[in-house]
Image: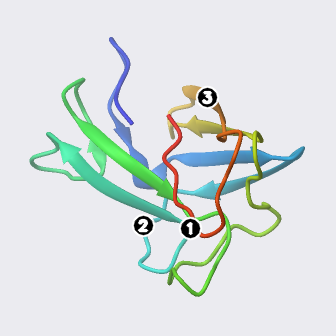
Amino acid sequence: MRLAAGADPINLSKASYTIETDGTARVINGKNDTDGPVEFHQLQGLDKKPLILSNQQDLMLVEFTLVSTTDNNANGIDGISTIEDGDEITFIVQAPAGGSTFATLRAPGRIDADGSYILS
């Protein structure tokens, strides 16, 4: 996640995230728990306040655990189903100040069991 040109700083832990799959949407907060469905990974910048994007050089990977499995320790998001071959998933991020952005991503046409994929 990165700030758009001219955007105000955003505290990712205080943002809300709407996730929609298969016609079902859920809103979660950005609280960064070790066993929660949202995890932040700093990629670039963010020297002083690691969960606040304050300029365009700041880059954060935001990881969502949709469904709990024996392979991860995180809790899934209630009501959200796994993504199947070719399915779409929509993420809407709303900053505490009210600004928002969204992205709709499509899963690969073929998903292998126990595979891990990065959608961008």
Give the residue number, with chain letter if any, for mark 2: 32
Question: How much space separates mark 3 and mark 1, taking CA atoms?
Answer: 18 Å
Closer-to-camera residue (36/115) = 115
Looking at the image, tell me whether mark 2 or mark 3 is earlier in sequence order: 2
Give the residue number, with chain letter if any, for mark 1: 37
Q: Answer few, some or many: residues within 10 Å of disc 2's Cα (few below 14, many 20 plus, some between 14 and 19).
A: some
Residue at position x 77%, y 41% in the image: 87
Q: Which image quadrant: the N terminus? A: top left
Mark sitting on residue 102: 3
Which amino acid is tagged 3?
A: Phe
Classify residue 9 as left or right of residue 49. Answer: right
Coordinates of residue 3 in the picture (x, y in percent):
35, 26
Coordinates of residue 14 in the picture (x, y in percent):
47, 52
Question: How much space separates mark 2 and mark 3, taking CA atoms?
Answer: 20 Å
Residue at position x 42%, y 55% in the image: 13
Q: Answer few, some or many: residues within 10 Å of disc 3's Cα (few below 14, many 20 plus, some between 14 and 19).
A: few
Classify residue 63 as left or right of residue 23. Answer: left
Coordinates of residue 117 in the picture (x, y in percent):
52, 51
Which amino acid is tagged 1?
A: Pro
Mark sitting on residue 116: none
Element under disc 3: strand
Which amino acid is tagged 2?
A: Asn
In the figure, 46 relative to 120: above or below?
Answer: below
Residue 39: image quadrant is bottom left
